[in-house]
Amino acid sequence: MRTSTLLSCLITWLVSVVSMVKCHDNYKCNHGAIISAEQITNTLTPPGIKTNNLGLLLINNERRPVYWREISVAPEYLAINGETLSYRAVFYDGGILLDILEIEHSEPEKQITKCIKFEGDKVASGGLPSDLGNI
């Protein structure tokens, strides 16, 4: 095999491997739950987990389907002060994360709060619009 062909194959392989590795930040939610980068990666990567369609969202001037999946958290963060809670990762295009949400299942309607992203020692908010509709 010629050196240029081998080098070309190696570069193609490296690009494909790097694109498969996704790095995420940690998130802290309103009721104290910490969603780790590892939990997010585990939630977004397995193909067998049910994916729920949230609808279309305008992303980079293009309408794209947006999805969500439940995130597993420690049991003490599933019910606080008599309220049932759940946590969801919202994403598009096979795992590009938009936000982590905490859902408080109270009556008469759900309360949805964005979890806060930790980037090193800085805190930044997520990227979904505030009107989330029927998540």
Image (spheres, helix red, strand yellow):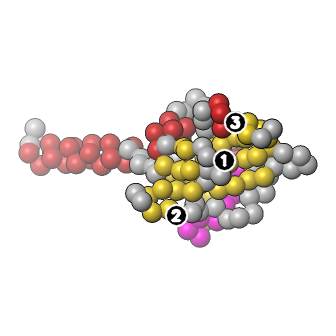
What amino acid is labelled 2 in the image?
Ala
Q: Give how far across and how far down residue 55 sits, in percent.
A: 72, 53
Residue at the spot of label 1: 31
Residue 94 at least partly seen:
no
Q: Nearer the viewer, residue 130 or 67?
A: 130
Q: In the rendered structure, does residue 60 fall within the stretch colored magenta?
A: yes
* Residue at the spot 52% in from the left edge and 63% down from the top edge: 124
* Residue at the spot 73% in from the left edge and 40% down from the top edge: 80
Residue 27 at least partly seen:
yes
What amino acid is labelled 3 in the image?
Leu
Name which of mark 3 and mark 1 comes first in the sequence.
Answer: 1
Residue at the spot of label 2: 124
* Residue at the spot 61% in from the left edge and 50% down from the top edge: 29
What amino acid is labelled 1 in the image?
His
Name which of mark 3 and mark 2 comes first in the sequence.
Answer: 3
SS of the residue under disc 2: strand
Which residue extends farthest right?
A: 108
Q: Give how far across and how far down residue 66 sits, in percent.
A: 64, 52
Q: Residues within 10 Å of mark 3 (few under 14, many from 20)?
A: some
SS of the residue under disc 3: loop
Q: Which residues are magenta?
A: 53-61
Indicate which disc residue 78 carries.
3
